[in-house]
Image (cartoon, rainbow, N blue to C red):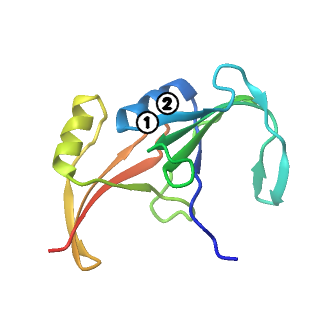
Amino acid sequence: MPLLNLVHINLHVTDLDSSIDFYERLGFTVMHDLGRNEPRPMQAIEVSPLSQHGGGMVRGAVMSLGDDPRCSTKIELIQYVDPAPTARPFKPNHEVGVHRIAIRVKDIHSTVADLRAKGIVIPSGPHEVYTMGGTQRYVLFPDPDETMLELIELSRD
């Protein structure tokens, strides 16, 4: 059977409330409450010798761009309450793993202006590169826990 689509991206966060506020300013809305106000236990599951899943008490929420539960872009924000979250160390650009989350926009200039007006810090750009048969305009910026986000406008030039 083929894979169908990406269901969500899970982000562990330091402060659930500030992350929800940040992603709401980007246009996401809370779709599901996963113990947002009351921490819940998360089942521990063995995955590999180098990866852990679950265990402890967490608060969380699933946020969505759009309201179709099967097709919208979703992020799952999880804040560990016990054990307490630890800050992520500096991640060099050559480190293996997820490097950034890219989100497509129609008009990069107006989107960046709107987000900056909402207090989102976008340090530079938009930048431009010719790739995949057209011009790609993009900006890079961090969320409250330094997860790198990228906004991309694609055009066939």
Q: Which of 96 and 65 is in front in this view?
A: 65
Question: What residue sits right under mark 2 in the picture?
Answer: 20
Q: In the rendered structure, which amino acid carries the disc numbered 2? A: Ile
Q: Is residue 6 above or below residue 33?
A: below
Disc 1, SS: helix
Label 2 close to label 1 by CB (< 8 Å): yes
Q: Where is residue 74 in the image (x, y as percent from the top left)?
A: 52, 47
Which residue is at a point 71% across and 20% down the rendered structure image? 38
Quarter placement of the N terminus: bottom right
Q: Position of residue 71 (x, y in %)?
A: 51, 55
Amino acid of disc 1: Tyr
- Depth check: give the residue in front, 118 or 65: 65
The quarter of the displayed image where residue 48 is located: bottom right
Q: Residue at x 63, y 25 (%)?
A: 36
> At x 84% / y 44%, what residue is drawn?
44
| Picture quadrant where residue 143 is located | top left
